[in-house]
């Protein structure tokens, strides 16, 4: 096999892996340019959505989260070179575990604290109850 | 090899380029853990290990994000995000960091072709953009503290300074690492161990940009609406 070394590089790669052997300079720069363009566009849309009335007010946070997730995806693919190819299974599985933990921590915290706030006594009522024993004295 | 053999060989290769299954008898793939591929190269192991470290760093950040998301309305009568944030400043910081991530990627391309001058140049631009980001952020923080909106003012501001400050510390550490790497590439050249360090630095810098994406979305843009 004439391209034995090439193939060895393709069999198992680290995230962020780029090699001159099979990625020419032009293709490498092209990939980063696409990543930059997509990220810049998504960032611009995020800022635009917040400071204009393009989207219905209460839907803005959801739209922003969707845009951020899309941009993180762009970064992972074009900057970190994570792909779904079988050679990337280890990296993607580690990432999936990380995403699970992050979703549990952020989602869980927001859920629990939101529920807790709902069941709390309104603030003015709570302060009144604190004052009551003093008034009786 | 006869013509028929070549065709079938090509077909299996197309369907299963990494030879993870359906290997013909006596044929060994080069993938690690599948026959005679041998252990993974040091480069792969270093990259994978560093990737796992970075994911643990992301988990750390997620705790700070969770705290901030919960405390975003706990202003204790102090200033809210809408009054504090300057959208232009945030936009410029975002642009600086995104551009630096791009030039960092270009440095990986330059390293791929072992070009000393282009590697140094792109790394230097990366560092300058990172420094611009950091100075702008420090300027913003100083302005907030001067206006009486320091981290001690409210739970909202404590969590804001914690999460943004933690990211700033990471960028500062990244800049020190970047300077060290430039010196190492200059004096030691593209040795295998230096290349591995450059790979790790690249991963680190791109992940910092990913964290900033989450940060400007959750802290600044969603905070703006509160």
Image: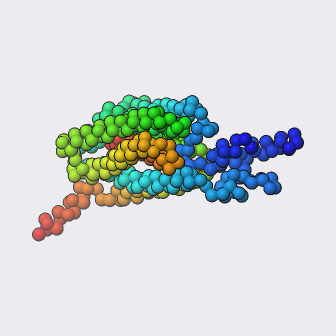
Q: Residue furthest bottom?
A: A137
Where does residue B90 sit, x and y in percent of width and height?
34, 36
The residue drawn where x is 66% and y is 45% is: A5
Where does residue A35 sit, x and y in percent of width and height?
51, 35
Q: Quadrant of the N terminus of chain B?
A: top right
Relative vertical location of residue A31 with respect to residue B148 in this rendering, above or below: above
Relative vertical location of residue B197 with respect to residue B106 in this rendering, above or below: below
- Side of B160 where B212 appears, left or right: right
Residue B73 seen: no
Residue A80 seen: yes
Q: How is the image coloured?
A: rainbow
Where does residue B4 sit, x and y in percent of width and height?
88, 41
The residue drawn where x is 21% and y is 59% is: A127
Viewer-closest of B113 and B174:
B113
Task: Tell how many labels.
Answer: 0
Q: Residue A118 occupies which quadrant of the picture? A: bottom left
Q: Residue furthest front?
A: B187
The residue drawn where x is 83% and y is 40% is: B7
Q: Residue furthest left?
A: A137
Relative vertical location of residue B132 with respect to residue B48 in this rendering, above or below: above
Viewer-closest of B66 and A39:
A39
- Side of B40 where B179 appears, left or right: left
- Side of A52 where B42 appears, left or right: right
Q: Quadrant of the C terminus of chain B?
A: top left
The residue drawn where x is 22% and y is 42% is: B142
């Amino acid at each position: 096999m004439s391209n034995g070394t090439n193939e060895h590089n393709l069999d198992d790669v680290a995230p962020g892996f780029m090699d001159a052997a099979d990625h020419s300079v032009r293709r490498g720069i092209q990939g980063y340019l696409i990543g930059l363009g997509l990220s810049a566009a998504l960032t611009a849309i995020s800022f635009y959505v917040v400071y204009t009335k393009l989207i219905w007010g209460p839907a803005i946070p959801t739209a922003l989260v969707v845009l951020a997730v899309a941009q993180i995806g762009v970064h992972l693919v074009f900057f970190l070179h994570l792909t779904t190819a079988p050679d990337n299974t280890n990296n993607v599985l580690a990432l999936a575990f990380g995403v699970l933990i992050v979703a549990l921590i952020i989602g869980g915290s927001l859920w629990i604290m939101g529920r807790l706030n709902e069941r709390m006594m309104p603030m003015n009522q709570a302060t009144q109850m604190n004052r009551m024993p003093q008034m009786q004295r | 090899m006869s013509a028929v053999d070549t065709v079938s060989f090509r077909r299996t290769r197309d369907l299963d380029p990494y030879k993870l299954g359906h290997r013909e008898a006596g044929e060994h793939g080069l993938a690690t853990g599948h026959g005679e591929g041998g252990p993974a190269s040091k480069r792969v192991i270093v990259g994978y290990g560093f990737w796992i470290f970075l994911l643990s760093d992301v988990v750390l950040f997620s705790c700070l994000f969770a705290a901030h998301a919960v405390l975003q309305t706990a202003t204790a009568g102090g200033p809210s995000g809408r009054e504090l944030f300057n959208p232009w400043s945030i936009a410029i910081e975002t642009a600086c960091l995104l551009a630096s991530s791009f030039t960092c990627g270009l440095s990986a391309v330059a390293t791929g072709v072992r070009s000393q001058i282009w590697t140094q140049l792109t790394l230097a631009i990366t560092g300058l953009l990172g420094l611009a980001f950091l100075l702008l952020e420090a300027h913003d923080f100083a302005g907030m503290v001067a206006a009486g909106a320091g981290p001690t003012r409210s739970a909202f501001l404590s969590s804001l300074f914690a999460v943004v400050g933690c990211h700033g510390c990471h960028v500062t550490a990244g800049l020190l690492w970047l300077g060290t790497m430039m010196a190492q590439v200059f004096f030691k050249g593209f040795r295998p161990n230096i290349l591995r360090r450059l790979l790790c630095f690249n991963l680190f810098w791109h992940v910092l940009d990913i964290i900033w994406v989450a940060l400007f979305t959750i802290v600044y843009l969603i905070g703006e609406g509160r």
